[in-house]
Amino acid sequence: MELTNYIILAIGALLLVSVYASLLSARVGMPLLLVFLGLGMLMGEQGPGGIKYDDVQSAHLIGSLALAVILFDGGMRTEVTTFRVGLRPAMLLSTLGVLVSSLVTGWAAMWVFDLHWMEGMLIGAIVGSTDAAAVFSLLRNQGIELKQRVGATLEIESGSNDPMAIFLTIVLVEALATGRSVLEWHWLLEFVQQMGLGGLAGVGGGWLLVRMVNRIRLTPGLYPLLVLAAALALFGAVSSIGGSGFLAVYLAGLVVGNKPLQAGHNILRFHDGMAWLAQIGLFLVLGLLVQPSALLDHAGQALFVAAILMFVARPLAVALCLKPFHLPWREQVFIAWVGLRGAVPIVLALFPLLAGLEHAREFFNTAFFVVLVSLTVQGWSVAPLARKLGLNVPQESVGLHRVGLDIPGQPDFELAVYEVAARTPIAGKPLTALTLPPGCRLAGLVHDGEPQDLRQVENFRVGDFVYVLAFRQALPQLERMFIPTSAQAETAKRQFFGEFVLKGDARLEDMALVYGISVPPEYSGKSLAQLFGEHFHGRQVPGDRLPLGSIELVIKEMQGEQVVSVGVKLPH
């Protein structure tokens, strides 16, 4: 009984220290995952805590459960609207990008550790996936919001690249465990099976879960548990039939998070806490499992592998995958540098240990060292780099507070609170002039701390707090009424577009529709390249600028005398 009490005390103390450590992380810009790893190592066998933990099987179980919870929560918080700008580049990064990174890093590991080529590729596959979720927590802590295209690409990639790295790792572990020296074609069919089953089960399971939550009546506190249980059951079921459980649980979260859901806000809050608990528990366990002295045995070689991954493999993969999309070099540099490694590589490094491979402990220590270097070097520099490259946009958080009402049978209602600022469009106007979107109603108004009788208030005054009952889908349209007029259009455009690059053969009318400008009649039906050719009489060069309405066109790239790409610059 005494031992039980001490174990409970130790677990509670570790969680308390981990939660309070998040305050330090936010202040100094330290990646929070690095804090949890450090705490685990301090509590381990070679640290002051002296806890001996070497059960790889239980660590693998904890890691798989934690990753399922983290991916499901990540899916629920990914807005499906971001897919219009980030899906295609993110899908290339999460498949071809992982493969390229794994091959280049694997070659470096093979050379520096003097391993068989398949063992080198195994190290590359283990560290092949990124953890951009850690990056977004850093950016939020430092008040930075990325341009939508960059943020969407990273967000979708981080949620969808784990299955590729997991598949490559399992294939290579199986090949090495059975003594094979070559890869076989049937593994390609296995990849299609895993991704196909995972994708179908994830979308279908998410759809069924939404219908189930919205149809049954439970005590409010049981809805989050129902969703968590269903997500874990889906993960286990898909994995047991040969599909990718990680892909399935991410896609299920994506479906659940983007549908009207009964007790939706309770579910999101609960899963936010569960995701934090999963991360804390996972990294504490992984920190306990590692022996710091063993990391130093091959520190030089592991540092070389980490350097190749950060400065060669990831940038090369990003350059190849993003080339068809003509992203500006600043965005490509940032996406390349944000290839942060986190929990998944360390969990994958447990697979060789479970299979009893010859160099399994060396693989684990190398992956752990790479993650430490990545979190330290890249994690601390992400926010400054975003500012340096000009990829952050002004934050227009006009909604002071949003409360999900969770009305039975009406899961979409929220109570939104806005403050009337000096340049807000409705400032000084009568209440009768406020035209709310469909499904929204003015619920109340507070001035100088006193609730006002709406029948006796004539005009909106600066400093008023406006309470609006609204459908969730109407909130973006509603918020535009409370953004200062000078920032409205510009913020939205800069957040979505940034400095956009278009192909030279793009039609001028198509571009004009996107940017909301008019096309002079003489340029009707012509491409951007033709526009520059006629304006400069064929003597255009890279860097030539052409004002057009509220935007400016800049020649980005030429082949001979032909304009092949044009940048669209928005006014600052």
Image (cartoon, rainbow, N blue to C red):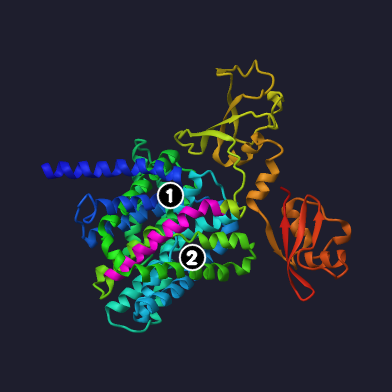
Q: Residues within 10 Å of mark 2 (few under 14, many from 20)?
A: many
Up-down relation of residue 552 to residue 477 (above or below): below
Which residue: 60% across, 57% down? Answer: 85
Magenta stretch contains residue 382: yes
Whether 509 is among the magenta residues is no
Residue, x 35% and y 65% (percent of image)? 367
Q: Which residues are magenta?
A: 361-385
Amino acid on which disc 2 is placed: Ser
Looking at the rendered structure, the secondary structure element under dot 1 is loop
Type of residue at label 1? Met
Residue at which label 1 appears: 30
Q: Please state, as top left, top right, bottom left or bottom right, where the N terminus lies in the image.
A: top left
Name the quadrant containing residue 293.
Answer: bottom left
At horizontal 55% and vertical 39% (from top left) the residue drawn is 472
Q: Is residue 563 visible?
A: yes
Q: Which of the two residues, 102 or 251, is positioned nearer the viewer here?
A: 102
**Magenta residues, dominant SS class:** helix
Residue 455 — which label?
none
Percent x, y for residue 27?
45, 42
Q: Which mark is residue 94?
A: 2
- Left or right? Give the position of 549 relative to 172: right
Is label 2 or label 1 in front? 1
User: Which of the 4 image quarters holds residue 366?
Assistant: bottom left
Residues 164 and 139: in front is 139
